[in-house]
């Protein structure tokens, strides 16, 4: 272990964004040890990391971040000096069904990790870093105008965003109270490969492919700001290395889409890929009962990250969406694995009565 220049625990590395972060770090920094710590919930999938799992500087440990004792053991075993924390319950609709699961993992789990850092690093914080990956949803819902900046007040409105907001507050509390060297980012909606098909884009791709109804909540007028997941991972790399302790950075693509327009765009991309007549897939669009407390609009001002750390998105949305559709069409086996079993029950429960 001692020949590594950094020993980083990445929590939630088997999930969607976490697997992209692990892949980037393991490949780009052979002198870093990357320890993926994941409980492998329904959203965690080691198949996401097949291409790096045999690399020397990658390790996996199955552990639950709500188990403080297990975290301490891993800190000691690997001599962890940095944490990139992504593990979370991440789906808003599930948070409406089971809010306490979100309080446990997102609030208690984050507090446990912070406490493990404090206990293990024993006030010697040189070359240490705790990076908390958070969301734009903590800022609440925008009207037609304006953008979320780092100074926007928190106003979470779903159990998911309330749990993430709470975790953000714990992170800042450890910075102010104990001088723990933390850094945090709040990102907009991600899309890309390995995205679990409970979320809008992969769910729609899967349903279009299988000619199933496309459940658009309400009138499809809600707006999200979409960023390619690889660009989020690049931002995390930049902030991890160059971000200022105690600072937060918004990450977003300046790329707002109304849900309905996005679903139409996906339909037209997939009509071409699947050799369907133009307009054929859009006939599957089905307006269903709205999500309770559905936030109208998210939009991120990522100026600080651009001006201070030089990051910008690398890909236009249409190109990224096409790459994403191609990945799903070429990775049927992955899709079949994650949509078997419990996914069917979740889907029935979530959409049958809408
Ligand atoms: P995901 O649901 O795909 O992955 C979450 C991962 O965390 C899974 O591998 C799961 O097994 C693991 N996990 C869950 N509970 C755990 C526990 N108790 N202990 C250990 N591991 C556990 O989520 P994602 O979309 O990749 O999001 C990752 C992070 O990024 C989250 O913190 C989320 O709030 C944040 N985020 C997501 C988005 C987005 O658009 N998906 C945008 C901004 C921020
Ligand atoms: O903004 C960042 C957040 O983006 C992350 O913090 C969350 O982890 C991530 O899940 C995502 O939250 P959203 O609720 O915005 O994403 P979701 O894909 O669930 O929904 C996107 C939009 O599409 C939202 O307005 C609800 C709508 N929707 C979603 C689903 C699943 C539908 O119309 N139909 C659907 O079936």
Image: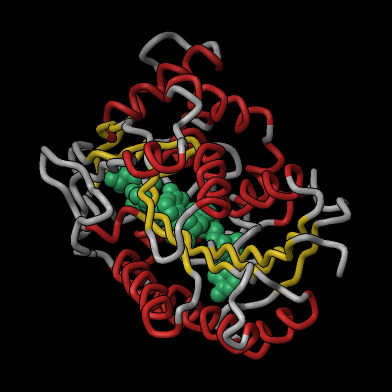
Can you give x and y, in whole percent of width and height, for residue 165 in the image?
32, 68
Q: Of 280 and 164, which appears nearest the observer?
A: 164
Can you give x and y, in whole percent of width and height, for residue 173 in the image?
36, 79
26 shown above or below 163 = above
In the picture, measured across the screen, residue 171 lies left or right of residue 125, that is left
181 shown above or below 241 = below
In the picture, measured across the screen, residue 300 lies left or right of residue 125, that is left
Please tell me which residue is depicted at 28% across the width and 31% down the height of the picture.
Answer: 257
Please tell me which residue is depicted at 14% across the width and 41% down the height of the picture.
Answer: 146
Q: Of 74 and 224, which appears nearest the observer?
A: 74
Q: Of 266 and 121, which appears nearest the observer?
A: 121
Instruction: Give the total of numbered labels.
Output: 0
257 shown above or below 162 = above
Which quarter of the rendered picture does the N terminus lie within?
Answer: bottom right
Please tell me which residue is depicted at 39% across the width and 49% down the height of the picture.
Answer: 187
166 shown above or below 267 = below
* Picture quadrant of residue 248: bottom left
Answer yes or no: is residue 57 visible.
yes
- Furthest-left residue in this view: 144
* Picture quadrant of residue 302: top left
Please tell me which residue is depicted at 32% across the width and 39% down the height of the picture.
Answer: 303
Answer yes or no: is residue 342 visible.
no
Can you give x and y, in whole percent of width and height, for residue 131 in the image?
52, 63
Can you give x and y, in whole percent of width and height, for residue 239 in the image?
50, 51
* Picture quadrant of residue 335: top right
Rendering colour mode: secondary structure
């Amino acid at each position: 272990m001692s020949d590594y220049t950094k020993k980083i625990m990445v929590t939630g590395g088997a999930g969607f964004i976490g697997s992209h972060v692990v892949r980037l770090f393991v490949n780009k920094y052979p002198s870093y040890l990357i320890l993926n710590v994941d409980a492998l919930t329904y959203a965690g999938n080691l198949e996401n990391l097949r291409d790096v799992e045999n690399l020397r500087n990658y390790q996996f440990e199955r552990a639950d971040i709500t188990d403080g004792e297990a975290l301490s053991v891993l800190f000691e075993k690997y001599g962890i000096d940095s944490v990139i924390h992504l593990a979370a319950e991440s789906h808003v609709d599930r948070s409406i069904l089971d809010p306490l699961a979100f309080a446990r993992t997102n609030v208690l789990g984050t507090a446990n990790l912070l406490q493990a850092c404090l206990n293990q690093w024993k006030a010697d914080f040189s070359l240490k870093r705790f990076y908390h990956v958070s969301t734009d949803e903590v800022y609440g819902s925008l009207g037609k105008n304006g953008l979320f900046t780092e100074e926007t007040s928190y106003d979470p409105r779903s159990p998911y965003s309330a749990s993430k907001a709470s975790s953000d507050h714990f992170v800042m509390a450890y910075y102010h109270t104990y001088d723990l060297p933390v850094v945090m980012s709040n990102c907009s909606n991600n899309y890309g490969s390995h995205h679990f098909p409970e979320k809008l884009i992969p769910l729609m791709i899967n349903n279009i492919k299988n000619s199933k109804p496309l459940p658009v909540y309400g009138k499809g007028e809600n707006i999200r700001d979409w960023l390619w997941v690889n660009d989020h991972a690049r931002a995390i790399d930049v902030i991890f290395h160059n971000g200022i302790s105690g600072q937060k950075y918004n990450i977003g693509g300046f790329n707002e889409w109304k849900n309905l327009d996005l679903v139409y765009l996906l339909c037209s991309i997939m009509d071409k890929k699947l050799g369907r007549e133009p307009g054929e897939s859009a006939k599957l669009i089905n307006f269903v009962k709205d999500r309770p407390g559905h936030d109208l609009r998210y939009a991120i001002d990522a100026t600080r990250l651009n001006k201070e750390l030089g990051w910008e998105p690398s890909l236009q949305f249409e190109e990224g969406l096409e790459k994403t559709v191609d990945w799903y069409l070429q990775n049927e086996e992955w899709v079949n694995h994650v949509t078997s079993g419990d996914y069917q029950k979740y889907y029935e429960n979530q959409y049958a009565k809408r």
